[in-house]
Amino acid sequence: MAERVENWRLILEAARSLTDSGQAPFTRISVYEWIWRRYPQSSHDRPSLDPAFQGMVKGATGGPRSLAGTPLLKVERGRYILAPASAEGQEDANVRLALPAARQPGGGLVEDEVKQGAKEYLEASGFSVTVAWGHQRGIDISAVSENETLFLEAKGSAVNPPQQVNYFVGALGELLQRMSDPAASYGLALPDNSQYRGLISRLPALTWERLRFTVLFITAAPSGGYTVQRISAQHFRFPGQSRHGVSDTRCS
């Protein structure tokens, strides 16, 4: 039997997803419908979701306080947004960003899990790593070592293939917009699945060469932690080139 995910985690992940897809302000029902499309409604029915949702709204009365604090803000009748960090809510925001998000059904990884796996791997490889958790602005992962500066955009798993393609294309766009250091290497941190690998394999050789492009494929290890495989240009056979090198794989 699959492990039951706490209602507050599901509500927070739904709010994040709706915000990312331009559907904010969102309604309580749109949050619930997002959850019901992914989890059995019998396990997360409205009577069990309502108290959790109420307890996550800033200034609302009633409902149990969640470990995420009060990340939801009511902006008009029946409509909500993710609350921005403020002097009064900074503690809630810090708690929210530090907590791992709910894992996607089917063993996929959400974005913050991908970031965590990349961070552990890069730190073990001698990098000093800065991560933009949750929806913080800026490059997702900045890593600096004696020999390399690396900037990565991270994406999580999606519930359907078209959405995952959108995640991939969006990550490339965000990466290009944030290119500012000509000496740095740029790349992506992604869950290790067949679709993302297929999309990566179709990138042209010039992308790998000009950007010194690299990809970290992240897998959740059964014993806890993450297995990470780093892929760079030498792991592909491009026209007129021979394949050489091996992938760099570690378990954190």
Image: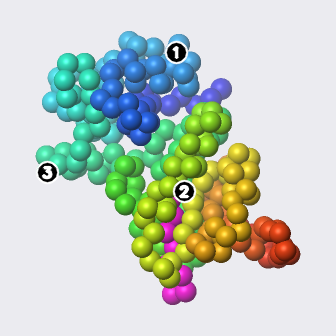
Checking the image for residue 41, the label placed there is 1
Q: Amino acid at mark 3?
A: Ala
The quarter of the image holding the N terminus is top right
Q: Is residue 114 left or right of residue 10?
A: right
Q: Which residue is mark 3?
A: 87
Magenta stretch bounds: 146-154
Q: Is residue 89 left or right of residue 107?
A: left
- Identify the mark nearer the N-term, 2 or 3: 3
Q: Which residue is mark 2?
A: 172
> Which residue: 15% across, 30% down?
59
Checking the image for residue 52, the label placed there is none
Q: Nearer the viewer, residue 91 or 190?
A: 190
Label 2 to label 3: alpha-carbon separation: 34 Å
Q: Is residue 169 visible?
A: yes
Estimate the x, y position of residue 102 in percent, counting from the top left.
Answer: 49, 38
Q: Nearer the viewer, residue 167 or 94?
A: 167
